[in-house]
Image (cartoon, rainbow, N blue to C red):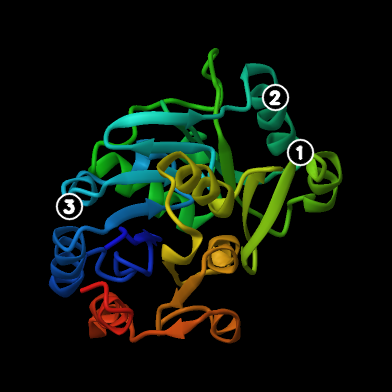
Amino acid sequence: MKSKIVFFDIDGTILTENTLKIPDSTKRAIKKAQKNGHLAIINTGRPIRSIDSFIKELGFDGFICGCGTYVEYKNTILLSKQLGNNISKAVVKDLRKCKIDAILEGEKDIYYEEDENIISKELLKIKAHHREQQLYNGATWDSSQIDFDKLTIWTNDNSNFEEFYDKYKDIFEFIHRGENFYELVPLGFSKASGIEYLIKYLNIPFENTYAIGDSTNDLSMLKYVKNSIAMGNSNPLLFDLVSFVTKDIEDDGIEYALKHFSII
């Protein structure tokens, strides 16, 4: 039997967005898939730096992070792409000029503005979580060696999004995640590019590729793999674009999907 490889998004896919917990059925299903000889890979927009320890402790075979800017397999880093110090500093300058909130996400560090300069309540909530989980070590936008892979931004009534977009549209893909929420990924990188890189490295047949997600930033990987799965709690835009729609995350959706495809 040739190994199948399953790519899992994190938020809303294996991790509930309300309780921030991984259902027991999901843990059980992932372990059983691996016991059956298959590979379980995280594929997330998060940088490796902000993946919670309880997720890593599940024993995934590898990680694709930062929307394809970082690839790790069996604790070996295969790919790591940063923007560089000069571009990173220029982005900070323009974020401030255009009054846009952001999390600057890198392999080594996550960079935040000081709390009093942040308008987005959602961003403040994420920052507090990162502090609580000891994922944030205090790096700020003014760090002299700032160097990140990608970023997420939140606009507000005072933001000049158009100016920022016009300047960086040839550097980043702007993935619209909500009313005022965007994920910015360097052009040429995506969750799909990470999959392509890893399956070539491992020589996995394309027909043995599976991906499970719930959000618009999962579209690239869902469109790329042979077998695409949307969670029942997904953004409805995904439902007509995938091979299979499983149940909600809290209704044993991962386990149901892996059984459907005879992975477990």
Amino acid type, residue under disc 1 in the picture: Ile
Amino acid type, residue under disc 3 in the picture: Leu
The reply to whether residue 209 is in sight is no
Residue for badge 3 = 58
Upstream in sequence: badge 2 or badge 1: 2
Residue 222 placed where, x, y %?
A: 53, 68
Residue 167 image-quadrant placement: top right
Assess disc 2: are there few (<14), some (14-19) or many (≥20) residues with their C-alpha within 10 Å of its C-alpha: some
Assign a secondary structure to mark 1. loop
Residue at the outermost top position = 144
Q: In the image, what residue occupies the spot 34% across and 61% down?
A: 4
Assess disc 1: are there few (<14), some (14-19) or many (≥20) residues with their C-alpha within 10 Å of its C-alpha: some
Q: Which of 47 and 39 is in front in this view?
A: 39
Residue 263 placed where, x, y %?
A: 26, 72
Proximity of marks 2 and 1: CB atoms separated by less than 8 Å? yes
Q: Position of 127 compared to 54: left or right?
A: right
Residue 200 placed where, x, y %?
A: 50, 44
Q: In the image, what residue occupies the spot 40% across and 61% down?
A: 9
Residue for badge 2 = 87
Q: In the image, what residue occupies the spot 75% across and 36% down?
A: 97
Whole-Å distance between the Cαs marked 3 and 2?
Answer: 35 Å
Q: Is residue 55 above or below residue 246?
A: above
Q: Which label belongs to residue 171?
A: 1
Assess disc 3: are there few (<14), some (14-19) or many (≥20) residues with their C-alpha within 10 Å of its C-alpha: few
Q: In this view, does 25 lie above or below 221?
A: below
Q: Position of 100 compared to 255: left or right?
A: right
